[in-house]
Image (cartoon, grey):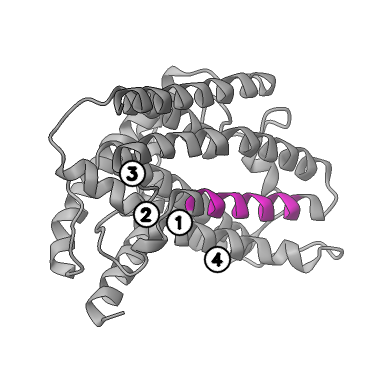
Amino acid sequence: MNFAGFLSQSIEVVIAILLAPLLTGWVNQWRAWLQNRSAPALWQPYRVLHKLFNKESVVADHASRLFRTAPYVMFGCMVLACAITPTLSVDLPLAPAADAIALVGLFALARVFISLAAMDIGVGFGSMGARREMLVGFLAEPALLMVLFSAALISKSTSLTTIVQTLTHRELAIYPSLAFAGVAFTMVSLAENARVPIDNPATHLELTMIHEALILEYSGRHLALLEWAASLKLFAYSCIGLALFFPWGVAEVQAPAAMLPALAVLVFKLAIGGFLLALLETLSAKMRIFRVPEFLGTAFLLAVIGMLVQLLLSH
């Protein structure tokens, strides 16, 4: 690994870590405006993280080492997911690791750790949230894989960097398979990031909460890492969606100077995506937890249809 590659990779990771809370603040701000409420400051997620890092972490006496380790594992998995996703450049040292299956595996690893940690204390809400989280993951991960495979059929590779390069250099065209995959990916992203209509990150309703039930027993720096990891997960899914469906503007060299225009394009695309996410949440109603399998089953079917359409068109 040369110095330019190391520096470029480090810049991409640092930008992801710094921009992730800003994206969350942007979505929360637009969501409040669209609902005719007083909006929180754009920097509110940073203030929350600062407050939590300065608080003491209270841990139950019978909590195991898994409970203390899970926030660090989840944060590390989300950082690595952002690092291997081609957000600013496709020619980075970790680009060979940007495989679709490896990316889904990172999300699965983080889910397993946080679910086990939620059940570790033995509190009812944690166990309930863990069961719901594993249900969502069991249904969402196959749908996400089918979405990634639909794009992989176009580029003949499961590497995200290859997919971005292939779609960028091809003539602008409408792919019916990507249209189906785009709808499926949006549905999976809402479920995986605990957004409306699957979950509501702004409430603590006992009968409906999923993500909040998992982190209910955490405090201090542990809770800060989990909240930061949630923002990074939203950032990673947003960047995956941009890489699959709007790949233009990503640099193709390791030079940090070439990444500056790519950063401006990324911020512009994330700003539009954040607004659309807030609009979609505002127009949607929270569904019952029993309807979630139907919702994610529909996403899986749409993704499979997209993959079959691409197979038919390629022959």
Mark 3 vs mark 2, foreground winner is 3
Query: Relative to 184, is 24 above or below?
Result: below
Q: Work out which residue is located at the far front of the displayed protein and give it.
A: 315
Q: Secondary structure at mark 3?
A: loop
Q: Amino acid at mark 2?
A: Thr
CA separation in Å, label 1 and label 4: 23 Å
Disc 4 + disc 3, Cβ < 8 Å: no
- Asked if residue 131 is among those painted magenta in the image, a careful observer would answer no
Give the residue pinned by disc 2: 85
Q: Residues within 10 Å of mark 3 (few under 14, many from 20)?
A: few
Q: Residues within 10 Å of mark 2 (few under 14, many from 20)?
A: many
Q: To which quarter of the image does residue 31 belong?
A: top left
Mark 4 vs mark 2, foreground winner is 2
From the viewer's perspective, is 128 left or right of 34?
A: right
Mark 1 vs mark 4, foreground winner is 1
Q: Which residue appears at 56% of the width and 68% of the height?
A: 54
Q: Which residue appears at 83% of the width and 41% of the height?
A: 124
Give the residue pinned by disc 3: 156
Give the residue pinned by disc 1: 81
Magenta portion: prevailing SS class:
helix
